[in-house]
Amino acid sequence: MNKRTLILTLSFFTLTLIFLESCTDSGTEADTEFVDRQEQLANVGNNIIIPSYRALQEASASLDVAATAFADDPNESNLTALQNQLKPVRLAWQDANLFQFGPAESLVLRSALNTFPANTDQINSNIESGDYTLGTAENQASTGFPAVGFLLHGVGDTNQEILSAYTDNSNAANRMQYLQDNVDFILNNANAILNAWTSDDGNFIATFLSEQNSGTDVGSSLGMLVNAYILHYERFLRDVKIGIPSGVRSAGVPRASATEAFYAGYSNELAIANLQAVERVFLGTGLNGTGGTGLEENLIALDATSLSDEITAQQNEALTALQGLDDPLSSQIENNNEPVTAAFQEMQDVLVLIKADMASALGVSITFQDNDGD
Amino acid sequence: MKLNKTLNSILFGLAIFSLIMVAGCDTTSNNSDDKIDAPETFEFSRNGASSVAYPGQTDRLNMVAEMKAYVGQANSGSVLSEQDLIDMFENTDGNGGGNFSFTSDRELENKTFAPDLDENLFTDILADAAEASVNANNGVRASSGTAGLIERENKGSDILVDEDGREFTQLIEKGLMGGVFFNQIFNVYLTDDRIGPGVENEALEDGKNYTAKEHHFDEAFGYFGAPVDFSSPWPEAREDDARFWSHYADVSDDQIPFIETLMNAYLNGRTAIVNEDQGTLNEQVDILYEELELLAAATSVHYINNTLTELSNGNQGEAFHALSEGWAFVNALKYSPRRDITLDEINQILTTNFGENGNFWNVTPQGLNDAKSTLVNIYPALQPVQDQL
């Protein structure tokens, strides 16, 4: 026989082996990082997510108490107390808003509670008619924290004027009702998300930590967490809090009124709190400050220590940039926007690291840009 | 040379082994009598020529595709002519009044579900689309009670929605997938009237290579829109080959193996007709009724989930797009005479759960979750995958 026949025959045999291989269902994949991943999920679930939702629920309950006191006796002191109670809820939200998957997605929590800028025309028309359902698609921007922010800080220039809006002005009673309904709506949603994670009925923490969801594929707990985390960082921290108001997303034309707490004037403080929450999930630091396993340890276990260090360093750069801005952020944007766009760039540098490098090191596919294409 | 001889023997053995193994992967083999085994692709022949034909179905698939494309022009501000739309629906002059890129003697309207015709369901949507396109042309933005344009945020382009926030292209395209394609499969071609024991299955149709019974079943396959070699997993490179219903079988195939189940039922059903085996045919028909209805239900849940996601992401236009799809797929559940869901339940989803008074602007997460629970309760197969769809 000649060499050519030999090669041909051997090739045919090899092809057959490949063909046979494709007939069988191969697929046991070594899962060496399983322990770290489960430890990380348990830490994030038990020490960050649930405490964050609990803190949100508690702050919302306090807001509700203050709102009831204001309704019972609308005076300046009760107004101030209520205004002061809004801020801790909005800060608590910054810790709780990174987890828009599972129950939060069913509740459409983020859009329900924090779509901004508030649509003040719609709010005023709802107040005037007294006919509205909070939580509908139409009312997304006239409900939740931004709406309450407008109602408590934006319906007059001074607290005396604001008080009049609830006592003397036209539609005062309807306005008070709209305020109360919004505070109830916030509390109901905060109760619902906490229950969905912790109650016997909901118990999403068990789903989150189940072995079935312990992989890295689409729909796994890590897949959901990392996708939600990066999506939030990109669109709802970098863009919505900084990029859009500073004009980066609108051809360089700033939109100061699109800041998160435009009427209350503490948008930058909220952005800083949110970036710190992002960092906390990365490091695995519990809401109470206790250290634990986070994405950082997961990366280190995957031999990506230098990437992990790079992310931490860049996150600190972004945090420093935000801390260099002044509230009200709208004034900072109007008077000296350059540091705001510079902060955006620092945040952009974090995004590149977490969206491309971190996700691929973790073996998680980014799915949120997909759409049906029809 | 001795070594060479030994090597030769080994190689010969390997080659034979290869041949046997490769042949072993093929599931078709000849039977002793006239009975055939189900083939792997939807190809059947008689006397060396194909006995499968469904050009009428392909024409109607193309008509819906071109209607969708025409309506889609309104998304970028073109004014639509109601007459053109009706001409396409009725296929005036065999070319949709000059709007189709092809000619055909078939039409969509006379194959539409009769109660839909009684209610002017589609002609009303076509008239509304034409009227709304004037708003689009004037740059009117959509709001509750006003038809107009709304941005699909992920794409950065607009879609035209009606006064209830429903996207016209979806109502028309997916609506006709139900009102014509499902209607014809469920109420015509899979019925005893067309493939029952009394239907001619020996004499060939005039000038054709198929019996009446074979042809009727093939028409039911044609409305599924699948390529003849449709199989799972379906390669992304050939995504466009799977049209309409078969496309959605692929969309949810990871969660529920629709491709395999439906293709097997079509292949085994057609084989049973060749084999004159009414019992097996009836079993396959039962599977088709059940699984096609389940496909519409699964696709409905898919788009409800999609709507929740898009609302979560603050993408109202994307949410309305997804919910418009959901609307049409829930509506499609009504066409099966064997449906597990009641008309009242369908109505409840469409006119209350998807927004009070059938207005998407009124939709709430609660309503969407209620619709999802209704579907999951009625179709238990959806339960384990309800959040993954």
Image (cartoon, grey):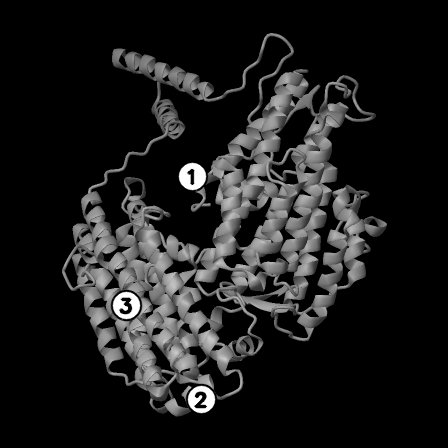
| Chain containing mark 3 | A
Amino acid, disc 3: Val
Q: Left or right: A236 with respect to B57?
A: left
Same chain? Circles 3 and 2 = yes
Q: Quadrant of residue B226?
A: top right
Does A275 sit above or below residue B101?
Answer: below
| Chain containing mark 2 | A
Between tags 1 and 3, which lies in front? 1
Mark 1, residue position: B384
Residue A219 % position (x, y)? 37, 47
Please give the name of the residue rendered at 66% of the width and 63% of the height, measured from the top-left corner: B162
Amino acid, disc 1: Pro
Q: Locate the N terminus of chain A and report the quarter of the image it occupies.
A: top left
Mark 3, residue position: A350
Mark 2, residue position: A164
Q: Quadrant of residue A10?
A: top left
Separation of residues labelled 3 and 2 (CA atoms): 46 Å
Is disc 2 surrounded by few (<14), some (14 to 19) or many (20+) residues within 10 Å? some
Residue B368 % position (x, y)? 51, 54
